[in-house]
Amino acid sequence: MAQMNYLTQCTFDFGALAQLPKVLKTHTVSRPFVVTDPGLRANGLLDMLLGALGEPPAGVFAETPANPTESASAKAADAYRSSGADGIIAFGGGSSMDLAKAMGLMATHEGPFARLGGSQRGMRHIGRIPPLVAVPTTAGTGSEVSPGAVVILDSGMKETFVSPFLVPVAAVCDPELTLGLPPLLTAATGMDAMTHCIEAVLTPVVHPPAEAIGLDGAERIGKWLERAVKNGQDRDARWHMMMGSFEGALAFAKGLGAVHGLSHALGRIHELKLHHGTLNAVILPHSLAMIAETGGAEDKLARIRRALWLEPNADLAQYILDLNARIGLPANLSAMGVKAEHGEGAIDYAVSDIATLSNAIPFDAGKYRELFKRAL
């Protein structure tokens, strides 16, 4: 039996940031606590946010690492509790938004934190967190409308936390904030969104609205990503890429798949500091090839080809490989510094990742070994 939910209020367009005080007031937040990262403090975007607020926030945590960690989340939660804040603004890419969600959990739930994770079936323990308004500055993760957060635990495991209570109460999506994104980050975050759309469509979970949104998102990204990479000031491209990112997260209410399972597992390798979107981009074509080889999901693969304006017999995996090359992303995991010896540890984590459960075809350790080998 299908169960279908949809998600949160979104203020979307150039200039949307000016509406942030009104959005906060609607959700009775008068003393927001801002979660962001060092890059946005350095490049002046944090000042833009603070200017839009008018009144100083209760506090600012600008130490979000590239891959959110349990320890950084705990530090932010301590600062939140001592600030007297009554709500949260998550400002940045997926890392800041995920850390803000983790911080909200820690501020309102008893530990240990790991018990709330997906691998522990922790959703049943998750209740409300402080009102969270998300303001994305990239076009990739869609975390501003997603019920999930991914955090590296102190144990080293990259855990997914999932609950309807983690969906921000509102999102403020202003493509103006993405005009300064450099080409490689535009490419990597854009392919993160593309992977969300494609994997969501391919999952066997029944959710036709989410599937339709994923197809529309894939079509937008296929049309506009290269333009956004080539000219970061292209306002039309930035608008459509932010919408494609937003749609990717709406779509993955339906689930994700093995690309994310392996990407999460490799992303936990601290010394490599691998970018999640780039990992997804590199792994995606090989997952698509393995799905196609089984003859599985052929109807859905055909719908994806149509959305991307490809010929009916087009090789979808090759399309993604060629797109990655045109936008300057690595050809394989080896080019990112991943070595064969990283495989077995990553596979163990990937098999237990919540995304694996909704893959288009069943994926066990053997299939993950094959996927890793192809992507390497």
Image: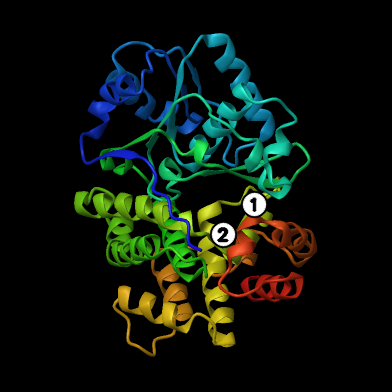
**Tag 2 residue:** 279
Q: Is residue 248 above or below residue 293?
A: above
User: How far apart are labels 2 and 1 at the CA level?
Assistant: 8 Å
Residue 234 percent across, percent down from the top left: 22, 52
Amino acid at dot 1: Gly
> In the current view of this chain or complex, which residue is farthest to the bottom?
313
> In the current view of this chain or complex, which residue is farthest to the front?
1
Q: Quadrant of residue 231?
A: bottom left
263 vs 132, nearest the viewer: 132
Amino acid at dot 2: Leu
Q: Secondary structure at mark 1?
A: helix
**Tag 1 residue:** 267
40 vs 35, nearest the viewer: 35
Q: Secondary structure at mark 2?
A: helix
Identify the residue at image location x=73%, y=38%.
115
Q: Is residue 173 left or right of residue 315?
A: left
Quarter the C terminus occupies: bottom right
Q: Is residue 211 left or right of residue 99?
A: left
Query: Can residue 330 be seen in this snapshot?
Result: no
Identify the residue at image location x=45%, y=41%.
93
Q: Is residue 324 left or right of residue 291?
A: left
Q: Is residue 195 above or below residue 293?
A: above
Identify the residue at image location x=52%, y=70%.
204
Identify the residue at image location x=21%, y=39%.
14
Q: Is residue 25 above or below residue 324?
A: above
How are the colours assigned in the image? rainbow
Q: Quadrant of residue 44?
A: top left
**Badge 1: few (under 14), some or many (20 or more) residues near its Cα, within 10 Å?**
many
**Badge 2: few (under 14), some or many (20 or more) residues near its Cα, within 10 Å?**
many
